[in-house]
Image (cartoon, rainbow, N blue to C red):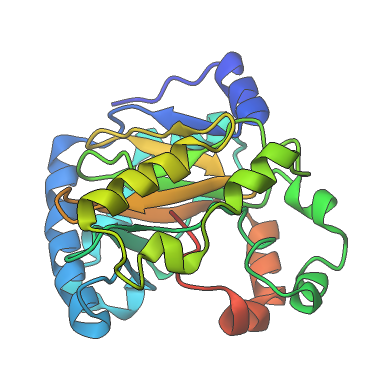
């Protein structure tokens, strides 16, 4: 399809921090990407076990078949849509900066509510990465534009609209985020049954003030500001293969290059939902 982006759509993205391109992938590309994703899932579980949520740095795994990823990156409708929504300087990240996100094989779990970067670094490493200050960098439209493209229906990602512009937290948001820690969202002590854990996670996601589920159908693509509040919740019985990357710019590449050592040391694999 051809993306038709209006001035109102661009304003919505700036104000709310997300936009969904509905049915932007053609059926033929969905089919090709699903084949690649199936191979990626097998490899991810071989490397990291049954709970593996992702395979990243896809250019390092040529055996999965990279041609569909390159076709995605160059898809005219997507390129035109991103240019219209953001700017002609934004481009889809290359396979080296792509990941596939999967369902767990055995147990439901979630990430904690977070804003990317801010909530994954110690104060010292945060100061190193954001030496120009959190708000000026987090507000830069050239940075932190994240993509989730669903190859199967995907309701996993939760998002709080508008928190891309308001970068300080309300008391309600802070309290909701702290209602569960890592051990809780992963049910590490197995004190809840799978059904109980699923209900627990649904409540944890839904009780964040203003939160919505970015419900995607196969072929939909969500573009969102990753510095806004977001999380992901996953269950074994719902198949997931979602292509995860960014709408990058020279400024974003420069930011990543400058902070590469910090990322390698401190950012967890759960970044990205």
Residue at 24% across / 75% down in the picture?
A: 44
Question: Considering depth in this image, is 53 or 247 the residue closer to the camera?
Answer: 53
Residue at 17% across / 65% down in the picture?
A: 105
Above or below for 109 versus 29: below
Question: Considering depth in this image, is 221 or 28 the residue closer to the camera?
Answer: 221
Above or below for 226 versus 212: below
Q: Position of residue 202 (x, y in %)?
A: 37, 41
Question: Considering depth in this image, is 228 or 221 the residue closer to the camera?
Answer: 228
Q: Horizontally, is 19 left or right of 213 in the view?
A: right
Residue at 56% across / 51% down in the picture?
A: 179
Q: Position of residue 195 (x, y in %)?
A: 22, 49
Residue 164 visible here: no
Judged from this view, the residue extending furthest toward the front is 191
Q: Horizontally, is 159 left or right of 174 in the view?
A: left
The image shows a total of numbered marks equal to 0
Q: Horizontally, is 259 left or right of 192 in the view?
A: right
Quadrant housing residue 6: top right
Residue at 20% across / 74% down in the picture?
A: 50
Question: Considering depth in this image, is 196 or 39 the residue closer to the camera?
Answer: 196
Judged from this view, the residue extending furthest toward the right is 132
Residue 180 visible here: yes
Q: Position of residue 237 (x, y in %)?
A: 14, 51
Image quadrant for the N terminus? top left
Quadrant housing residue 150: top left
Above or below for 142 versus 133: above
């Amino acid at each position: 399809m051809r993306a038709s982006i209006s001035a109102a759509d661009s304003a919505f993205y700036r104000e709310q921090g997300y936009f969904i391109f509905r049915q932007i992938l053609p059926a033929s590309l969905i089919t090709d990407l699903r084949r690649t994703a199936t191979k990626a899932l097998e490899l991810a579980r071989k490397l990291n076990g049954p709970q593996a949520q992702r395979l990243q740095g896809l250019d390092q795994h040529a055996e999965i078949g990279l041609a569909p990823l390159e076709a995605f990156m160059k898809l005219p409708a997507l390129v035109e849509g991103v240019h219209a929504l953001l700017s002609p300087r934004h481009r889809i990240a290359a396979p080296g900066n792509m990941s596939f996100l999967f369902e767990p094989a055995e147990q439901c779990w979630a990430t904690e509510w977070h804003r990317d970067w801010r909530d994954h670094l110690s104060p010292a490493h945060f100061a190193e990465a954001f030496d120009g200050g959190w708000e000026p960098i987090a507000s830069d439209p050239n940075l932190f534009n994240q993509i989730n493209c669903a190859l199967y229906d995907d309701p996993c990602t939760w998002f709080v609209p508008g928190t891309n512009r308001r970068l300080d937290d309300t008391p309600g948001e802070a309290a909701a985020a702290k209602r569960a820690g890592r051990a809780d969202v992963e049910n590490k002590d197995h004190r809840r049954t799978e059904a109980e854990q699923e209900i627990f996670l649904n409540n944890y996601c839904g009780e964040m003030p203003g939160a919505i589920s970015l419900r995607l159908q196969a072929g939909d693509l969500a573009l969102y500001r990753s510095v806004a509040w977001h999380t992901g919740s996953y269950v074994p019985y719902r198949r997931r293969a979602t292509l995860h990357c960014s709408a990058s710019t020279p400024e974003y590449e420069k930011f990543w290059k400058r902070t590469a050592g910090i990322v390698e040391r401190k950012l967890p694999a759960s970044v990205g939902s």
